[in-house]
Image (tube, rainbow, N blue to C red):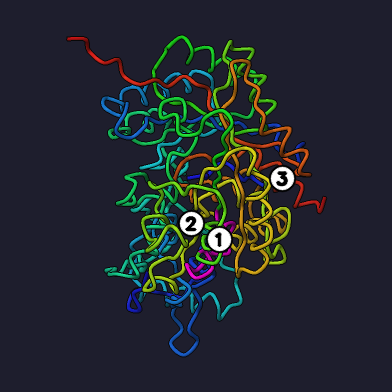
Amino acid sequence: MTNTLHRFGARETLRNDYIIFAMAARGINDEGAPPKLQTFLRLAVKHQPINLGNALKGGIFRSSKALTPLAHWRRRGGVTPAEVVEGVDACTTVAAVFDDPKRLEGFLKDLRQADLGISINISALTDEARTCCQRAGITRHSVEYSLGFHGDLNRLPDRHVLELSTMCGHGMVSSNFTKKMIDWVKEGRRSAPEAASYLARFCTCGIFNTTRATCILEEARIGT
Amino acid sequence: MQIDQQKCVACSNCIPTCPMGAIYIDTTVNRATVNLDECVECFTCYRGMSKEHLNPTVVRSIRGFLRLLRVRFDPEPDVCPTDALTPQELTWPRIVRQAFSDPLVPHESTGVHGRGTEEVKTNDVTGRVGEGEAGFTIEFGRPGVGVRFRDIQKMTMALAALPIAFEKRNPVFSLMTDPRTGAIREDILDEKVLSAIVELKATLAHVPQVLRMVEEVAPTLDTIVSIGVATRCDAQGDNLLEPLLKREGYTFFRGKTNLGLGRRPAVASA
Protein backbone atom coordinates (compact mmCIF):
# COMPACT_ATOMS: atom_id res chain seq x y z
CA MET A 1 0.00 0.00 0.00
CA THR A 2 2.35 2.68 -1.22
CA ASN A 3 -0.60 4.79 -2.27
CA THR A 4 0.90 8.10 -1.22
CA LEU A 5 4.56 7.46 -2.01
CA HIS A 6 4.96 8.14 -5.71
CA ARG A 7 3.21 11.46 -6.29
CA PHE A 8 4.61 12.89 -9.47
CA GLY A 9 5.72 16.48 -9.73
CA ALA A 10 8.61 18.88 -9.47
CA ARG A 11 9.74 19.68 -5.97
CA GLU A 12 8.13 23.14 -6.07
CA THR A 13 4.70 21.71 -6.96
CA LEU A 14 4.77 19.45 -3.91
CA ARG A 15 5.26 22.17 -1.32
CA ASN A 16 1.55 22.39 -0.52
CA ASP A 17 1.06 18.66 -0.16
CA TYR A 18 1.17 16.96 3.24
CA ILE A 19 -0.64 13.71 3.89
CA ILE A 20 -0.62 12.43 7.43
CA PHE A 21 -2.07 9.05 8.23
CA ALA A 22 -2.53 6.71 11.16
CA MET A 23 -2.70 2.95 11.31
CA ALA A 24 -2.26 0.14 13.81
CA ALA A 25 0.04 -2.85 13.31
CA ARG A 26 -2.03 -5.91 12.55
CA GLY A 27 -1.97 -8.45 15.36
CA ILE A 28 0.15 -6.24 17.61
CA ASN A 29 -1.62 -3.04 18.63
CA ASP A 30 -4.78 -3.14 16.52
CA GLU A 31 -7.07 -4.16 19.35
CA GLY A 32 -9.18 -1.18 20.33
CA ALA A 33 -7.71 0.91 17.53
CA PRO A 34 -10.91 2.42 16.02
CA PRO A 35 -11.48 4.95 18.84
CA LYS A 36 -7.84 6.02 18.53
CA LEU A 37 -8.26 6.46 14.79
CA GLN A 38 -11.33 8.59 15.46
CA THR A 39 -9.34 10.70 17.91
CA PHE A 40 -6.69 11.17 15.22
CA LEU A 41 -9.32 12.46 12.80
CA ARG A 42 -11.00 14.68 15.40
CA LEU A 43 -7.68 16.30 16.22
CA ALA A 44 -7.01 16.74 12.50
CA VAL A 45 -10.36 18.48 11.93
CA LYS A 46 -9.35 21.16 14.48
CA HIS A 47 -6.55 22.18 12.13
CA GLN A 48 -8.70 22.45 8.99
CA PRO A 49 -7.39 19.75 6.65
CA ILE A 50 -8.45 20.00 3.01
CA ASN A 51 -9.36 16.31 2.85
CA LEU A 52 -9.95 13.58 5.34
CA GLY A 53 -10.22 9.88 4.70
CA ASN A 54 -11.09 6.44 5.95
CA ALA A 55 -9.51 3.83 3.66
CA LEU A 56 -12.55 1.57 4.03
CA LYS A 57 -15.28 4.12 3.36
CA GLY A 58 -13.78 7.05 1.50
CA GLY A 59 -12.99 10.68 2.07
CA ILE A 60 -14.92 13.91 2.33
CA PHE A 61 -15.39 13.80 -1.43
CA ARG A 62 -17.23 10.64 -2.40
CA SER A 63 -19.74 9.31 -4.84
CA SER A 64 -23.43 8.85 -4.12
CA LYS A 65 -25.42 5.75 -4.98
CA ALA A 66 -28.79 7.46 -5.15
CA LEU A 67 -28.65 10.78 -6.97
CA THR A 68 -31.71 12.47 -8.35
CA PRO A 69 -31.66 14.52 -11.58
CA LEU A 70 -31.44 17.65 -9.40
CA ALA A 71 -27.82 16.65 -8.73
CA HIS A 72 -26.91 18.21 -12.06
CA TRP A 73 -27.60 21.64 -10.57
CA ARG A 74 -27.48 21.26 -6.79
CA ARG A 75 -25.20 18.48 -5.79
CA ARG A 76 -23.78 17.50 -2.45
CA GLY A 77 -20.37 16.24 -3.50
CA GLY A 78 -19.55 14.16 -0.47
CA VAL A 79 -19.89 14.05 3.30
CA THR A 80 -18.93 16.29 6.21
CA PRO A 81 -15.70 15.77 8.21
CA ALA A 82 -17.86 14.70 11.17
CA GLU A 83 -19.40 11.95 9.04
CA VAL A 84 -15.93 10.68 8.10
CA VAL A 85 -14.95 10.59 11.78
CA GLU A 86 -18.12 8.82 12.87
CA GLY A 87 -17.76 6.32 10.02
CA VAL A 88 -14.64 4.72 11.51
CA ASP A 89 -15.92 1.47 12.97
CA ALA A 90 -13.10 -0.94 12.14
CA CYS A 91 -9.34 -1.09 12.05
CA THR A 92 -8.25 0.80 8.95
CA THR A 93 -5.97 3.56 7.78
CA VAL A 94 -7.21 7.09 8.33
CA ALA A 95 -5.67 10.14 6.74
CA ALA A 96 -5.78 13.92 6.67
CA VAL A 97 -4.41 16.14 3.92
CA PHE A 98 -3.00 19.59 4.65
CA ASP A 99 -1.88 22.30 2.24
CA ASP A 100 -0.19 24.40 4.94
CA PRO A 101 2.83 23.22 6.99
CA LYS A 102 1.86 25.49 9.90
CA ARG A 103 -1.43 23.62 10.31
CA LEU A 104 0.38 20.31 10.07
CA GLU A 105 2.78 21.41 12.80
CA GLY A 106 -0.13 22.33 15.07
CA PHE A 107 -1.68 18.93 14.44
CA LEU A 108 1.62 17.17 15.18
CA LYS A 109 1.88 18.92 18.53
CA ASP A 110 -1.64 17.74 19.41
CA LEU A 111 -0.81 14.20 18.31
CA ARG A 112 2.32 14.12 20.42
CA GLN A 113 0.32 15.20 23.42
CA ALA A 114 -2.51 12.75 22.69
CA ASP A 115 -0.02 9.84 22.70
CA LEU A 116 -2.32 7.47 20.81
CA GLY A 117 0.27 4.67 20.60
CA ILE A 118 -0.49 3.85 16.95
CA SER A 119 1.80 4.44 13.98
CA ILE A 120 1.62 7.85 12.35
CA ASN A 121 3.32 8.75 9.08
CA ILE A 122 3.69 11.86 6.97
CA SER A 123 3.88 11.54 3.20
CA ALA A 124 5.44 14.71 1.78
CA LEU A 125 8.76 16.23 0.83
CA THR A 126 11.00 14.37 3.27
CA ASP A 127 13.02 17.38 4.41
CA GLU A 128 9.87 19.43 5.04
CA ALA A 129 8.26 16.55 6.92
CA ARG A 130 11.38 16.30 9.06
CA THR A 131 11.33 20.03 9.78
CA CYS A 132 7.66 19.90 10.81
CA CYS A 133 8.46 16.97 13.12
CA GLN A 134 11.40 18.76 14.69
CA ARG A 135 9.31 21.85 15.35
CA ALA A 136 6.76 19.63 17.06
CA GLY A 137 9.48 17.95 19.13
CA ILE A 138 9.38 14.64 17.25
CA THR A 139 12.41 12.74 15.91
CA ARG A 140 11.53 10.60 12.88
CA HIS A 141 11.80 6.84 13.30
CA SER A 142 11.96 5.54 9.74
CA VAL A 143 11.78 6.95 6.25
CA GLU A 144 10.90 5.60 2.82
CA TYR A 145 12.12 7.42 -0.29
CA SER A 146 10.39 7.43 -3.66
CA LEU A 147 12.89 6.76 -6.44
CA GLY A 148 10.28 7.36 -9.12
CA PHE A 149 9.22 5.50 -12.24
CA HIS A 150 11.42 3.19 -14.31
CA GLY A 151 11.06 1.16 -17.48
CA ASP A 152 9.29 2.20 -20.68
CA LEU A 153 8.39 5.78 -19.67
CA ASN A 154 6.88 6.41 -23.12
CA ARG A 155 3.79 4.71 -21.74
CA LEU A 156 3.20 7.51 -19.24
CA PRO A 157 0.75 10.34 -19.91
CA ASP A 158 1.74 14.02 -19.99
CA ARG A 159 2.96 16.00 -16.98
CA HIS A 160 -0.32 17.56 -15.86
CA VAL A 161 -2.22 14.30 -16.17
CA LEU A 162 0.48 12.51 -14.21
CA GLU A 163 0.62 15.16 -11.49
CA LEU A 164 -3.13 14.85 -10.97
CA SER A 165 -3.69 11.13 -11.41
CA THR A 166 -0.82 10.05 -9.12
CA MET A 167 -2.50 11.83 -6.23
CA CYS A 168 -4.41 8.57 -5.90
CA GLY A 169 -1.65 5.99 -5.72
CA HIS A 170 -4.16 3.18 -5.91
CA GLY A 171 -4.77 4.29 -9.50
CA MET A 172 -8.47 5.01 -9.06
CA VAL A 173 -8.13 8.42 -10.74
CA SER A 174 -7.70 7.38 -14.35
CA SER A 175 -5.53 9.19 -16.86
CA ASN A 176 -8.40 9.48 -19.34
CA PHE A 177 -10.80 11.01 -16.82
CA THR A 178 -8.07 13.39 -15.67
CA LYS A 179 -7.46 14.43 -19.27
CA LYS A 180 -11.20 14.97 -19.69
CA MET A 181 -11.30 17.23 -16.63
CA ILE A 182 -8.32 19.24 -17.91
CA ASP A 183 -10.11 19.67 -21.23
CA TRP A 184 -13.34 20.71 -19.51
CA VAL A 185 -11.49 23.34 -17.49
CA LYS A 186 -9.78 24.61 -20.64
CA GLU A 187 -13.13 24.79 -22.43
CA GLY A 188 -14.72 26.65 -19.52
CA ARG A 189 -17.26 23.89 -18.96
CA ARG A 190 -16.21 23.51 -15.32
CA SER A 191 -14.04 25.58 -12.96
CA ALA A 192 -10.74 24.18 -11.70
CA PRO A 193 -12.08 23.61 -8.13
CA GLU A 194 -15.13 21.81 -9.55
CA ALA A 195 -12.95 19.57 -11.70
CA ALA A 196 -10.69 18.89 -8.70
CA SER A 197 -13.66 17.71 -6.66
CA TYR A 198 -14.79 15.36 -9.48
CA LEU A 199 -11.34 13.80 -9.46
CA ALA A 200 -11.23 13.60 -5.66
CA ARG A 201 -14.41 11.51 -5.56
CA PHE A 202 -12.58 8.61 -7.20
CA CYS A 203 -9.91 8.46 -4.50
CA THR A 204 -11.23 5.91 -2.02
CA CYS A 205 -8.74 6.77 0.75
CA GLY A 206 -9.50 10.51 0.86
CA ILE A 207 -5.88 11.50 0.24
CA PHE A 208 -6.45 13.53 -2.93
CA ASN A 209 -5.15 17.07 -2.50
CA THR A 210 -7.78 19.36 -4.03
CA THR A 211 -5.74 22.53 -3.43
CA ARG A 212 -2.81 21.15 -5.41
CA ALA A 213 -5.18 19.76 -8.05
CA THR A 214 -6.80 23.18 -8.50
CA CYS A 215 -3.37 24.78 -9.01
CA ILE A 216 -2.38 22.14 -11.58
CA LEU A 217 -5.70 22.46 -13.43
CA GLU A 218 -5.31 26.25 -13.54
CA GLU A 219 -1.79 25.84 -14.95
CA ALA A 220 -3.05 23.38 -17.52
CA ARG A 221 -5.93 25.73 -18.42
CA ILE A 222 -3.63 28.50 -19.55
CA GLY A 223 -1.09 26.11 -20.99
CA THR A 224 1.86 26.57 -18.61
CA MET B 1 -17.19 -5.74 -14.40
CA GLN B 2 -20.08 -5.85 -16.77
CA ILE B 3 -22.52 -3.28 -18.13
CA ASP B 4 -26.19 -4.12 -18.15
CA GLN B 5 -27.15 -3.78 -21.82
CA GLN B 6 -30.81 -3.25 -20.92
CA LYS B 7 -29.94 -0.27 -18.75
CA CYS B 8 -27.01 1.34 -20.59
CA VAL B 9 -27.90 4.50 -22.52
CA ALA B 10 -24.43 4.89 -24.13
CA CYS B 11 -23.83 8.22 -22.39
CA SER B 12 -20.08 7.33 -22.35
CA ASN B 13 -19.51 8.77 -18.88
CA CYS B 14 -17.95 5.53 -17.65
CA ILE B 15 -15.48 5.26 -20.54
CA PRO B 16 -12.82 7.72 -19.31
CA THR B 17 -13.17 6.63 -15.68
CA CYS B 18 -11.68 3.20 -16.40
CA PRO B 19 -7.98 3.25 -15.38
CA MET B 20 -7.24 0.57 -18.00
CA GLY B 21 -9.27 2.10 -20.84
CA ALA B 22 -11.22 -1.15 -21.03
CA ILE B 23 -14.69 0.35 -21.60
CA TYR B 24 -15.85 1.30 -25.10
CA ILE B 25 -19.05 1.83 -27.04
CA ASP B 26 -19.92 -1.25 -29.09
CA THR B 27 -21.26 0.50 -32.16
CA THR B 28 -23.15 -2.59 -33.34
CA VAL B 29 -25.53 -2.32 -30.36
CA ASN B 30 -24.83 1.27 -29.28
CA ARG B 31 -24.10 0.27 -25.70
CA ALA B 32 -21.01 0.55 -23.49
CA THR B 33 -19.09 -2.73 -23.26
CA VAL B 34 -16.14 -3.95 -21.18
CA ASN B 35 -13.07 -5.58 -22.72
CA LEU B 36 -12.79 -8.31 -20.08
CA ASP B 37 -9.20 -9.19 -20.93
CA GLU B 38 -8.11 -5.63 -20.10
CA CYS B 39 -10.52 -5.07 -17.17
CA VAL B 40 -8.66 -5.56 -13.88
CA GLU B 41 -11.80 -5.64 -11.67
CA CYS B 42 -10.69 -2.54 -9.76
CA PHE B 43 -14.32 -1.43 -9.38
CA THR B 44 -13.31 2.19 -10.07
CA CYS B 45 -16.24 2.69 -12.46
CA TYR B 46 -18.70 0.97 -10.15
CA ARG B 47 -17.63 2.68 -6.94
CA GLY B 48 -16.27 6.00 -8.16
CA MET B 49 -19.24 6.98 -10.29
CA SER B 50 -22.36 8.26 -8.62
CA LYS B 51 -25.60 6.67 -9.71
CA GLU B 52 -29.01 7.83 -10.73
CA HIS B 53 -31.77 5.34 -11.28
CA LEU B 54 -33.51 6.88 -14.30
CA ASN B 55 -35.67 5.01 -16.77
CA PRO B 56 -33.35 3.97 -19.65
CA THR B 57 -36.01 4.39 -22.34
CA VAL B 58 -36.78 7.95 -21.25
CA VAL B 59 -33.07 8.85 -21.08
CA ARG B 60 -32.39 7.39 -24.53
CA SER B 61 -35.33 9.34 -25.97
CA ILE B 62 -34.18 12.64 -24.47
CA ARG B 63 -30.59 12.07 -25.56
CA GLY B 64 -31.74 11.15 -29.07
CA PHE B 65 -33.89 14.28 -29.31
CA LEU B 66 -31.09 16.55 -28.11
CA ARG B 67 -28.67 14.96 -30.56
CA LEU B 68 -31.14 15.61 -33.37
CA LEU B 69 -31.10 19.30 -32.46
CA ARG B 70 -27.30 19.29 -32.19
CA VAL B 71 -27.62 20.57 -28.64
CA ARG B 72 -24.54 20.01 -26.52
CA PHE B 73 -25.53 17.88 -23.58
CA ASP B 74 -23.56 18.88 -20.47
CA PRO B 75 -24.23 16.33 -17.74
CA GLU B 76 -22.26 15.64 -14.59
CA PRO B 77 -19.24 13.67 -15.84
CA ASP B 78 -19.08 11.14 -13.02
CA VAL B 79 -22.64 9.85 -13.00
CA CYS B 80 -24.13 6.68 -14.44
CA PRO B 81 -27.72 7.81 -15.09
CA THR B 82 -29.24 4.33 -15.08
CA ASP B 83 -27.07 2.35 -12.64
CA ALA B 84 -25.93 0.09 -15.47
CA LEU B 85 -22.53 -0.99 -14.06
CA THR B 86 -22.86 -4.51 -12.71
CA PRO B 87 -20.17 -6.50 -10.89
CA GLN B 88 -19.87 -10.10 -12.04
CA GLU B 89 -19.19 -13.07 -9.81
CA LEU B 90 -15.46 -13.70 -9.84
CA THR B 91 -13.85 -17.10 -9.61
CA TRP B 92 -10.24 -18.29 -9.60
CA PRO B 93 -8.00 -17.17 -11.25
CA ARG B 94 -9.86 -13.99 -12.26
CA ILE B 95 -10.54 -13.10 -8.65
CA VAL B 96 -6.82 -12.37 -8.30
CA ARG B 97 -7.45 -9.28 -10.45
CA GLN B 98 -9.78 -7.78 -7.88
CA ALA B 99 -7.58 -8.75 -4.93
CA PHE B 100 -4.73 -6.71 -6.40
CA SER B 101 -6.69 -3.93 -8.06
CA ASP B 102 -9.51 -2.99 -5.71
CA PRO B 103 -8.08 -1.25 -2.61
CA LEU B 104 -11.19 -2.05 -0.61
CA VAL B 105 -10.66 -5.80 -0.87
CA PRO B 106 -8.29 -7.17 1.79
CA HIS B 107 -5.77 -9.80 0.73
CA GLU B 108 -6.31 -13.08 2.54
CA SER B 109 -2.55 -13.37 2.95
CA THR B 110 -2.04 -10.01 4.67
CA GLY B 111 -5.40 -8.90 5.99
CA VAL B 112 -4.39 -5.45 4.75
CA HIS B 113 -6.46 -3.54 2.22
CA GLY B 114 -4.38 -2.66 -0.82
CA ARG B 115 -1.54 -4.24 -2.71
CA GLY B 116 1.26 -4.44 -0.21
CA THR B 117 1.64 -4.72 3.52
CA GLU B 118 2.16 -2.22 6.30
CA GLU B 119 5.77 -1.90 5.10
CA VAL B 120 7.71 0.71 7.02
CA LYS B 121 4.51 2.48 8.04
CA THR B 122 4.34 0.47 11.26
CA ASN B 123 8.09 -0.02 11.57
CA ASP B 124 8.03 1.77 14.93
CA VAL B 125 5.92 -1.12 16.24
CA THR B 126 7.04 -4.10 14.16
CA GLY B 127 10.75 -3.32 13.77
CA ARG B 128 10.62 -4.91 10.35
CA VAL B 129 13.46 -2.82 8.90
CA GLY B 130 16.39 -2.07 11.20
CA GLU B 131 19.35 0.30 11.03
CA GLY B 132 21.76 -0.95 8.39
CA GLU B 133 18.92 -2.54 6.44
CA ALA B 134 16.83 -1.38 3.51
CA GLY B 135 13.24 -2.35 2.82
CA PHE B 136 12.28 -2.20 -0.86
CA THR B 137 8.81 -1.76 -2.32
CA ILE B 138 8.99 -2.49 -6.02
CA GLU B 139 5.66 -1.72 -7.60
CA PHE B 140 4.52 -2.76 -11.06
CA GLY B 141 1.72 -1.30 -13.14
CA ARG B 142 1.34 2.14 -11.72
CA PRO B 143 0.52 4.73 -12.81
CA GLY B 144 -2.34 3.67 -15.03
CA VAL B 145 -0.58 0.99 -17.07
CA GLY B 146 -1.39 -2.28 -15.32
CA VAL B 147 0.71 -5.42 -15.29
CA ARG B 148 0.41 -9.15 -15.89
CA PHE B 149 2.00 -11.58 -13.44
CA ARG B 150 4.21 -12.92 -16.21
CA ASP B 151 6.10 -9.61 -16.15
CA ILE B 152 6.24 -9.53 -12.37
CA GLN B 153 7.76 -13.00 -12.44
CA LYS B 154 10.60 -11.80 -14.70
CA MET B 155 11.58 -9.37 -11.96
CA THR B 156 11.08 -11.73 -8.99
CA MET B 157 13.21 -14.39 -10.69
CA ALA B 158 15.98 -11.87 -11.34
CA LEU B 159 15.83 -10.56 -7.77
CA ALA B 160 15.75 -14.04 -6.23
CA ALA B 161 19.32 -14.56 -7.42
CA LEU B 162 20.52 -11.67 -5.22
CA PRO B 163 21.23 -11.71 -1.47
CA ILE B 164 17.77 -10.49 -0.51
CA ALA B 165 14.81 -11.77 1.48
CA PHE B 166 11.31 -11.44 0.06
CA GLU B 167 8.74 -10.21 2.59
CA LYS B 168 6.70 -13.28 3.49
CA ARG B 169 3.50 -11.39 4.37
CA ASN B 170 3.36 -9.75 0.96
CA PRO B 171 0.51 -10.77 -1.40
CA VAL B 172 2.82 -11.51 -4.36
CA PHE B 173 4.96 -13.74 -2.12
CA SER B 174 1.85 -15.75 -1.28
CA LEU B 175 1.51 -16.53 -5.01
CA MET B 176 5.10 -17.73 -5.45
CA THR B 177 5.55 -21.46 -5.95
CA ASP B 178 9.25 -21.27 -5.15
CA PRO B 179 10.57 -18.15 -3.38
CA ARG B 180 14.14 -19.39 -3.94
CA THR B 181 13.70 -18.91 -7.69
CA GLY B 182 10.99 -16.22 -7.59
CA ALA B 183 8.63 -18.41 -9.65
CA ILE B 184 4.94 -17.50 -9.50
CA ARG B 185 2.14 -20.02 -9.93
CA GLU B 186 1.49 -20.81 -13.57
CA ASP B 187 -2.30 -20.42 -13.59
CA ILE B 188 -2.24 -16.68 -12.85
CA LEU B 189 0.64 -15.56 -15.07
CA ASP B 190 -1.67 -14.07 -17.70
CA GLU B 191 -3.93 -12.32 -15.21
CA LYS B 192 -3.74 -8.54 -15.39
CA VAL B 193 -3.90 -6.32 -12.32
CA LEU B 194 -3.85 -2.56 -11.79
CA SER B 195 -0.66 -2.85 -9.78
CA ALA B 196 1.23 -5.22 -7.52
CA ILE B 197 4.04 -4.68 -5.06
CA VAL B 198 6.98 -6.93 -4.35
CA GLU B 199 8.59 -6.25 -0.99
CA LEU B 200 12.04 -7.37 0.02
CA LYS B 201 14.78 -6.60 2.46
CA ALA B 202 18.52 -6.31 1.93
CA THR B 203 21.51 -4.96 3.81
CA LEU B 204 22.52 -1.40 2.94
CA ALA B 205 25.66 -2.82 1.33
CA HIS B 206 23.49 -4.66 -1.21
CA VAL B 207 21.21 -1.71 -2.07
CA PRO B 208 23.18 -0.69 -5.20
CA GLN B 209 23.06 -4.28 -6.49
CA VAL B 210 19.28 -4.50 -6.05
CA LEU B 211 18.72 -1.12 -7.68
CA ARG B 212 20.90 -2.03 -10.66
CA MET B 213 18.96 -5.25 -11.16
CA VAL B 214 15.60 -3.46 -11.04
CA GLU B 215 16.84 -0.83 -13.51
CA GLU B 216 18.17 -3.55 -15.81
CA VAL B 217 14.98 -5.64 -15.87
CA ALA B 218 12.40 -2.81 -15.86
CA PRO B 219 12.86 -1.80 -19.54
CA THR B 220 12.22 -5.41 -20.62
CA LEU B 221 8.76 -5.43 -19.04
CA ASP B 222 5.47 -4.39 -20.61
CA THR B 223 4.75 -2.05 -17.70
CA ILE B 224 6.18 0.68 -15.46
CA VAL B 225 8.13 -0.02 -12.27
CA SER B 226 8.14 2.31 -9.25
CA ILE B 227 10.79 1.96 -6.58
CA GLY B 228 10.56 2.82 -2.90
CA VAL B 229 13.40 2.23 -0.41
CA ALA B 230 13.04 2.53 3.34
CA THR B 231 15.25 2.37 6.36
CA ARG B 232 15.33 2.92 10.10
CA CYS B 233 16.73 6.25 11.30
CA ASP B 234 19.12 6.73 14.22
CA ALA B 235 18.43 8.63 17.44
CA GLN B 236 19.00 11.95 15.64
CA GLY B 237 16.67 11.07 12.77
CA ASP B 238 19.54 10.56 10.32
CA ASN B 239 20.17 7.46 8.24
CA LEU B 240 22.88 5.95 6.04
CA LEU B 241 20.54 5.14 3.15
CA GLU B 242 20.09 8.74 2.02
CA PRO B 243 23.79 9.48 1.27
CA LEU B 244 24.12 6.03 -0.29
CA LEU B 245 21.27 6.70 -2.74
CA LYS B 246 22.77 10.09 -3.60
CA ARG B 247 26.13 8.47 -4.30
CA GLU B 248 24.31 6.07 -6.63
CA GLY B 249 23.04 9.05 -8.58
CA TYR B 250 19.38 9.07 -7.54
CA THR B 251 17.48 12.32 -7.19
CA PHE B 252 14.72 12.05 -4.62
CA PHE B 253 12.85 14.43 -2.40
CA ARG B 254 9.53 12.85 -1.57
CA GLY B 255 8.71 10.01 0.73
CA LYS B 256 7.03 8.71 3.82
CA THR B 257 8.21 9.56 7.30
CA ASN B 258 7.28 7.32 10.21
CA LEU B 259 7.11 9.52 13.30
CA GLY B 260 7.82 6.78 15.79
CA LEU B 261 4.70 7.44 17.87
CA GLY B 262 3.46 3.84 17.74
CA ARG B 263 4.30 1.27 20.38
CA ARG B 264 3.58 -2.28 21.40
CA PRO B 265 0.95 -2.71 24.11
CA ALA B 266 2.43 -3.10 27.57
CA VAL B 267 2.48 -6.72 28.73
CA ALA B 268 0.57 -7.07 31.99
CA SER B 269 2.83 -8.31 34.76
CA ALA B 270 1.77 -11.39 36.69
Per the image, label 2 sits on a secondary structure element best described as strand
Mark on residue B196?
Answer: 2
Kindly identify the amino acid type of the residue bearing the numbered disc 1.
Answer: Gly
Compute the Cα span from label 3 to label 2: 22 Å
Q: Nearer the viewer, residue B125 or A37?
A: B125
Residue that appears at 52% across and 43% down:
B201
Q: In this view, does A132 lie to the left or right of A52?
A: right
Mark 2 or mark 1, which has the lower sequence index?
1
Q: Mark 2 lies on which chain?
A: B
Residues behind callouts 3 and 1 on a single chain: no
Give the vertical position of A46 relative to A62 (above or below): above
Compute the Cα span from label 2 to label 1: 7 Å
Q: Nearer the viewer, residue A214 or B134?
A: B134
Which percent across, then down, holds residue A174? 56, 59
Query: Which residue is labeled 3 in the image?
Result: A9
Question: Are the residues at dot 2 and dot 1 in contact (C-beta closer than 8 Å)?
Answer: yes
Q: In which quarter of the image is the C terminus of chain B?
A: top left
Of circles 3 and 1, the one toward us is: 1
The residues colored magenta run B139-152
Q: Which chain carries label 1?
A: B
Per the image, label 1 sits on a secondary structure element best described as loop
Which percent across, then down, holds residue A64? 38, 50
Mark on residue B141?
Answer: 1
Magenta stretch holds residue A116 = no
Please tell me how crowded label 2 is: few (under 14), some (14-19), or many (20+) other residues with Cα within 10 Å.
many
Give the vertical position of B250 relative to A26 (above or below): below
